[in-house]
Amino acid sequence: MLFRPDSRDFRLIGLYGSRVLFGVGLVMLLPAGLAFLWGETNEGWGFVVAAGLTVLFSQGVEWVSHTEASLSRSHALAAVGSAWLLAPVFGAVPLLLSGHYASYLDAYFESMSGFATIGQSLANDLDHMARSVNLWRHLMQFMGGQGIIIVFLTVFAGSGGAIGSLYVGEAREEKILPNVVNTARFIWRVALTYAVVGVSLLWAALLSAGMPVGLGLYHAMNLFMAAFDTGGFATLSTSVGFYRSPLVESVLLPIMLAGGCSFAVHYQLWQRRGFEITRNIESRVLGLSILILFFVMTIGLARVGTMTDAGSLFRHGFFHAVSAHTTTGLATVPGRLYLTDWGVLAPATLVIGMALGGMASSTAGGIKALRVGLLYKGVRRDIRKLLLPENAVVVETYHAGSRRVLEGPQITAAVMILLLWLLLYLLGTLVGLFYGYDIQSAFFDSTAAASSGGLSVGIVRPEMETPLKLVYIAQMVLGRLEFLALFVLAGYVTAMVRGRA
Amino acid sequence: MFTAPSRPVSRFRMLLGTLALLGALAGVVGLSELLRHPHGDVGTAIPAAEGDFRDEIVCPDHPAPEEEVDGERATGPAVPVSSVDLYDCPTLYDGLLVHYQGEVVGALMHRDEGAWTQLNDDLYAGAAGPLPAHREYRGANAGVGVLLPADVAEQVQTVGGPRARGDVLSIVGTFHRVDPQSRESAVIRAEAGRVERLGRPIDHEPLGVRRIVGILLALAAAAMTAAHHISIRREPLREIPKPAASP
């Protein structure tokens, strides 16, 4: 039976959701300060307005949501869902005020694309966009990639046990350390370490590519956030292709791969257990899948004559295979060429890569390597059962931090999520087809939106139809949270309307 | 929701709460719209947007070269092209001498072989000028990566970006689907070029209303945060107990 929510339910959801928004508001002060420093006064005040609105709203909600009740799993999931829907509302304000977005909906799309680390953009004239606003686009990716819930609640909530459910609600498969606060701190430590190393290397690569010193550092920071958080936004409209530098691309490759790796694998590496990479089911699946897709892509590109020499095929093919598979979305060629110069096979491999995605508990989206691996193991177990005598006990194991036995419910859960993902990819494709786009383009951009792949052949543009924008926004947030949190939130809304007192 | 609630909220109160939430969000959107950049008049007739993404791509059978070659070192008649032409029909123009014009944006990256940059030939580089000075939204930028010879790169005085319109360069060079030397995709290796229009700084008029609203909102937010913290200190929130089951 469905019961109508009581005041405690609303207070708990409001309390934790508002704390996330408060954090988002505080982060806005960083680009605000930089805007004033860089002489972008109008944009600076735009950030002050946005931060003021965010803090006022969040504090207002927190005040009326004052409660001492404990957080249950359903509250946590609903709080996660509402925070993820509301954070882009406020994140969109400085974007709209920048004057580069045709409507509030476009700014919201961009904001959601940032927080959900999608990378698809509706920005007009990005190449003349204020630096502070461009930085904000990348900061949203950084917050979203690390997990806005875990980041802010670790700071503001204080109670580790209470936020464990929130952690899971944000599409994290497992806790790395027993205490979720320590897990969050570890995630931060990993991110900041990679940031220091990554930004330094990217800056050096950009300087060697001929970028000016100050501008190079700015680009390096943005590039790092886009790559490590598998976001895919770029400082300039031509993405990584602008730099015309194999060295920059080479530095980005391991950063994207690190972003696509689960934090559990990072933890093992942190503990100097390098063998985990070769044993872990996810790293095996991801590595093998990238190699297969790269191989198929080179065949596709060579077959249509786009690239024929090994150097070009490796450089562009491997970069795109990694970018798509980790759902980063950075590109070395203009998106239009996927349609006009890459034939059919190579873009198809990009779609498959984006659809499969990176590892679970990483910043990547998509179906995830863990589920693909479990499904493979499940099918193998069933085939072995058929081949062996009826009374034989078949045990299938996999390695994920430690050796684990494959259980039936894991397969069921993986199949269920796989089906949901496929439906999600189909949803945007069908709406795209309804609006007259060809199936190749519709499937490409729909998969990119849902999986957080972020590459685009060109459907995603400011002139795109409003219903399609709304569908893509829904795909982004559903994909980022892997359905559950939003399903629970929808359950609360249903209970509000139809629940019994 | 899934267990019998102790004190259910009446539907009327839920409706009021929902309306209050939606009202607050509508206020955020409304205020943002009010404070948007007061876009000025472009001051010139802007050509209507051409074509649609869904239109079938039709490439010409034979690109028509210009009668007059633009540039001293160009070795033959160049074909006038836009970035749309090059990206829509890259095979057709591969290896051809092309004449292309666009605004220098991003950066000028000097290397041994010349200087790499991006030349945009979109509306923002042309008649309308950069955003946010107007409301002629025409989508993402359009341009081509170009390798400029050192002497042409030296002519560039202003690179386009947030604070400036870049110089508009007119170049003659060879378009490559994949440049055989650098392995770059869809680029023009320029042989000659000249600055057609000098760039200039972009004037950003200070927006007084936005500043006033910003100050007021910042003060209100600070006051509310302080008041909230004071109220919490007077009545501290008990630590929330751990849930019974680990997620």
Image: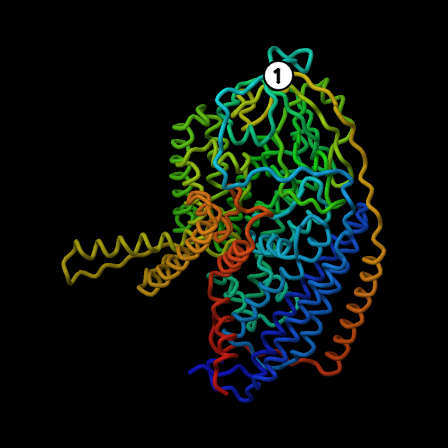
Q: Please state the horizontal and vertical placement of residue A258, each as a whole percent of the image.
A: 52, 46
Q: In this view, does B93 lie above or below A114?
A: above
A162 and A269: which is toward the camera: A162
Q: What element carries label 1?
A: loop
Q: Quadrant of the N terminus of chain A?
A: bottom left
- Residue A370 located left or right of residue B26: left
The residue type indicated by label 1 comes to: Glu
Q: Is residue A396 above or below residue B169?
A: below
Colouring method of the image: rainbow
Name the image quarter holding residue A466.
bottom right
* Crowdedness near tag 1: few (<14), some (14–19) or many (≥20) residues, C-alpha within 10 Å: some
How many labels sit on residues? Answer: 1
Read off the chain for label 1: B
Residue behind mark 1: B66
Does residue A34 appear anywhere in the picture? no
Q: Please state the horizontal and vertical placement of residue B228, each as a whole percent of the image.
A: 75, 76
Q: Please state the horizontal and vertical placement of residue A10, each as a whole percent of the image.
A: 59, 78
A375 and B100: which is toward the camera: B100
- Residue A18 located left or right of residue A353: right
A331 and A434: which is toward the camera: A434
Q: At 42% across and 30% down in the image, what residue appears?
A: A301
A259 and B92: which is toward the camera: B92
Q: Please state the horizontal and vertical placement of residue A310, each as a whole percent of the image.
A: 45, 25
Q: In this view, does A394 lie above or below A495?
A: above
Q: Is residue B81 above or below residue A43?
A: above
